[in-house]
Image (tube, helix red, strand yellow):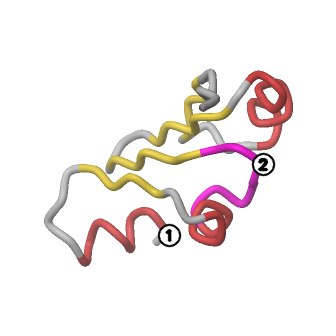
Amino acid sequence: MNKVDRLFSQISNDAVMVINPSNIFYFADYLADYCYLLLTKSKGYYFTDGRFIIEAKRDLSDYFEVVEITPKTA
């Protein structure tokens, strides 16, 4: 049983948003400077900015879809 399967076996949610860098690395085995995860039972979404798109697509498992986001500045 992998980490995501184990998570969903313990909770009743359909999806989980992961924002803590340590937890992102735990679930994805990859961490960019600016990223978030959305986990579902069947697919994960790795949100990151354009600096890390190529690396993330190369280094993440097929479970993850990489989605480019644009950070807003205040």
Question: Few, some or many C-alpha atoms within 10 Å of disc 2 (few <14, some 14-19, many ≥20)?
Answer: few
Give the magenta part as a residue range.
Answer: 27-35
Element at badge 1?
helix
Task: Give the residue at x 57% y 35%.
Answer: 47
Q: Which residue is mark 1?
A: 3
Q: Tell me how many marks there are.
A: 2
Q: Position of residue 21 (x, y in %)?
A: 64, 64
Task: Give the residue at x 76% y 36%.
Answer: 56
Task: Say what amino acid the circle numbered 1 marks.
Answer: Lys
Q: Position of residue 28 (x, y in %)?
A: 64, 56
Element at badge 2?
loop
Residue farthest to the front?
74
**In this rendering, would 53 be left or right of 45?**
right
Q: Which mark is residue 33?
A: 2
Task: Say what amino acid the circle numbered 2 marks.
Answer: Asp
**In this rendering, would 38 be left or right of 20?**
left
Q: Is residue 70 above or below residue 24?
A: above
Residue farthest to the bottom?
10
Gap in Å between the C-alphas at discs 2 and 1? 22 Å
N-terminal-most mark, 2 or 1: 1
